[in-house]
Amino acid sequence: MTTSSSRQNELLEKRFELGARGSNLRQEIIAGLTTFLAMVYSVIVVPGMLGDAGFPPESVFIATCLVAGLGSILIGFWANAPMAIGCAISLTAFTAYSLVIGQQVSIPVALGAVFLMGAAFTLISVTGIRTWILRNLPSSIAHGAGIGIGLFLLLIAANNVGLVVGNNAGLPVKMGEFTSFPVMMSLIGLAFIIGLERLQVKGGILLVIVAITIVGLIADPNVTFGGEIVKVPSFGENSLAFELDIMGALQPAILPVVFALVMTAIFDATGTIRAVAGQANLLDKDGQIINGGKALTSDSVSSMMSGLFGTAPAAVYIESAAGTAAGGKTGITAIVVGVLFLFMLFLQPLAFLVPSYATAPALMYVGLLMLSNVSKLDFDDFVGAMSGLICAVFIVLTANIVTGIMLGFAALVIGRIVSGEFKKLNIGTIIIAVILVVFYAGGWAI
C-alpha cells in the first residue's frame, strides 16, 4: 500500500510539480473547491440569460456544465494552471441580448459564430499571431469594450427585474416600481454580495443566490419546488448540441461579430490569465506566463466546445483568483473544479428553481466589476482614452457591442490624425477601422 501510494505521489509530482511549486494535494483540493464555490453561480445565470433569447434552458445548463467541466480539466492537465474555465457572463450577454435578440441572428448561426471565434482564437494562440494582434489592436478600445459590456450587463439585469423599464416620455428608460418584490430582492442581494465579497467570504455570490431563492419559495407564489433534486443529465427535447450553423456564421454580415468576439477574448483572456498567474507566482524571470500559450489555447478550445454543445463562449474566470489565494498553484486545482462541474450535471432541477431576481444581483455585481476597466485607461493619452469611452458608451446606448467598437476605432483614427498623433497609429488599427466603417456605411452590418 505504501509503495502504491508512493508511486502515485511520484506521478503527481512529475505531472504537476507539486513540490517545486510549494504545494500539496490537500492544498490543491481546497483551492479547487474554493474556486468552484466562487463561480458555480454561472450554471444558474447563463441558462437564464440565454433562455431570454430563446435558447432552451435545459440544454444550455448541460452544455454550460460540460464546457466548464471539460475546459477546466483541459487547462489543468495540459497547461498545469490553477485556472478554471466557464461560460463568460459578458459574452453570454453579447450572445443573448446583442446578437440573437438585438440583431435577430438565429440561434444556430450564433452558435456557429461562437465556434468560429474559438477556432480563430485557437489559430491565433498556436501560431503566435496573438502577439501581432495585441500590438496592433489598441488597448484603449479593448478596455472600453469591457466597460461597455459591464454597463450593458447592469442594464440587462436591472431591466429583467423591473428596476429599469422602457420610457415613452422622450428618454429611453426610467425607474420601475421600486417597492416591487423582485426589485427589492435584487437590490438587497447586490448589497449583500458587495459586503460578502469585501469580507472575502468563499462562495458569497452563490450564498446570496441560494438565500434569495429560499425567500422566494416562502414569499413568492411564482416560485415553486417540483420535488426533484437529482436528475439523469439530458439535453432535453430541444437539444442544441451540434446544431450550430458554421456556414451561416461565415456570411459577411456576421463576420464583424466574430471579430468582436475574438478581440474581446484575446484581451480578456490574456489579462485574466496573467492576473491569476501573477497571484500564483507562475510568471517566469522575463515576466511571461508559465505555459501561457497552452492556457490560452485551452481557453479558445473551450469556446469551440461551447459552439458544439450549444452555449455561450468560454473564458478563464477571474474567480480563479479565489483558488490561487487559497493556495492553488498547479493544474490539480483546475481539475478539481472541472470534476465538480461535471457532478453539477445531475443537479439540473435545482438550477431551474432559481428566480430571475435571485441571479440579477450576481449579474449587476459582475457588471460593476467590469467598470473597473476605467482605471486601465491611460488619460495621459487623451485621444486613446476618449476613444475607449466612446466605445463603452455606445455599446450600451445602441445595445450593440460591434457598433461601439466600430465607433471607438473610427474616433481613435480620426482623433489621432486631427491631433497630429498620426505616428501613434499602426497599419493594423487603420485597416480594422476602415473595414468596420465601410461595413456600417454600406449597410451590411446587422
Image (cartoon, rainbow, N blue to C red):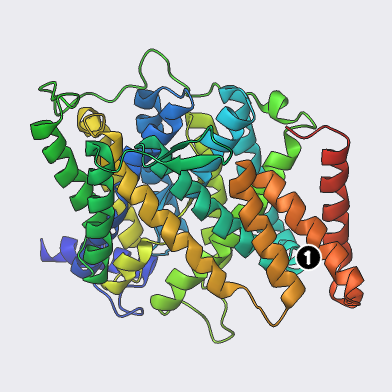
Query: Residue 154 versus residue 250: which sits nearer the camera?
Result: 154
Q: Is 270 located above or below residue 153 in the figure?
A: below
- Residue 285 rendering spot, x and y as whole percentages: 54, 87
- Residue 149 rendering spot, x and y as whole percentages: 54, 51
Task: Name the image quarter holding residue 343.
Answer: top left
- Residue 404 rendering spot, x and y as whole percentages: 68, 50
The residue sitting at 51% across, 38% down in the picture is 305
Q: Is 335 located above or below residue 110 in the figure?
A: below
Q: Is 386 located above or below residue 208 in the figure?
A: below
Query: Which element is circle 1 on?
Result: helix
Locate the C terminus by quadrant.
Answer: top right
Q: Is 110 located above or below residue 259 in the figure?
A: above
The residue sitting at 42% across, 15% down in the picture is 238
Q: Is residue 279 left or right of residue 206?
A: right
Q: Residue furthest top?
A: 237
**Residue type beneath disc 1:** Asn
Task: Name the image quarter holding residue 267.
Answer: bottom right
Q: Residue furthest bottom?
A: 285
Q: Is residue 19 left or right of residue 144?
A: left
The residue sitting at 76% across, 72% down in the picture is 383
Which residue was labeled with disc 1? 136
- Residue 435 rendering spot, x and y as whole percentages: 86, 47
